[in-house]
Amino acid sequence: MSAKFGPAGTSDSFAKMGYKGSLGMPEYIVKMGLDAFEYQCGRGVNIGEDKARQFGVLAAEKGIALSLHAPYYISLAAAEEAKLDNSINYILQSARAADWMGATRVVVHPGGKGKMEREVAVNLAISTFARAIKAMDEEGLGHITLCPETMGKINQLGDLDEIMRFCAVDERVIPCIDFGHLNARTRGGLTTREDFRKIFDTLQNSIGTERMKKYHAHFSKIEYSEGGEVKHLTFDDTVFGPNYDYLMDITYKLGCSPTIICESAGTQAEDALQMKTYYKSLETK
Ligand SMILES: [Zn+2]
């Protein structure tokens, strides 16, 4: 078992290297030395079944682990009932598209808290999340893993403890730990090895060793201010962080087999490869 690495969506180099469209992506991923890809449906699930299946075949041939990012406008704690129903529908649409392409994981943002007290919003979001899982089961999509993501802005639901509560809804749920987001919402809280270690302690205590080992991750350096996340940077940044070396070390030492998706701004494939290269160097030490 080993870690898999890949980009979120399309790096700038994809077009520069002459690739076009999602069907060109699997070859590009291999060419870049990577083995994972997160298909972006942040602005809506717009891929049709035929295209998704073609894409899935090409990715499977190349052994690429696929995940899919659900729409950003999902709001699991919306004040209006209709918006909650819509959010469940967006998760279902995402799960269907994931199933067509053979993606095993769907990453979901919990959304904001609106004018609610945080605890009220979290409880509502968790119950909507549970309804989404039930709807997926009823449609025969129970094999698709939902991955609730830790979020970068303090006002958004999804600090680490909240995401652990989402994971408690169903033992199939795997957390998407966005380390850049956690660093941003704690304004630089991920600096030392101990800072990273604590996240894994929380995972182990909350969801157990087996689920912890299969964690899903987003990793990028992210600019932050008072409210948390401002914007995604590249690995060239030396100001905001976080750095990936402790995460790679801990992942390797604990024998984890995560999927680690890089969300750098434009260089996500190159930066994913940087992490993978470092990780592989640990295996040969
Ligand atoms: Zn995300």
Image (cartoon, rainbow, N blue to C red):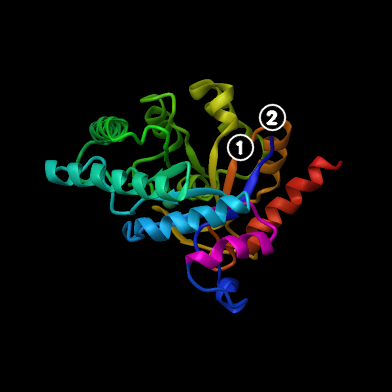
Residue type, numbered disc 2: Leu
Separation of disc 1 and disc 2 at Cα? Answer: 16 Å
Task: Give the residue at x 63% y 33%.
Answer: 197
Residue 201: percent from left, percent from top: 58, 26
- Is residue 155 shown left or right of residue 245? left
SS assignment at label 2: loop
Q: Identify the residue under disc 2.
A: 254
Which label number is shown at residue 195?
1
Residue type, numbered disc 1: Asp
Membership of 33 in magenta stretch: yes
* Majority SS type along the magenta span: helix
Visible residue check, residue 111: no
Which label number is shown at residue 214?
none
What residue span does the magenta drawing correspond to? 22-37
Task: Give the residue at x 56% y 29%.
Answer: 212
SS assignment at label 1: helix
Visible residue check, residue 270: yes
Residue 237: percent from left, percent from top: 62, 63
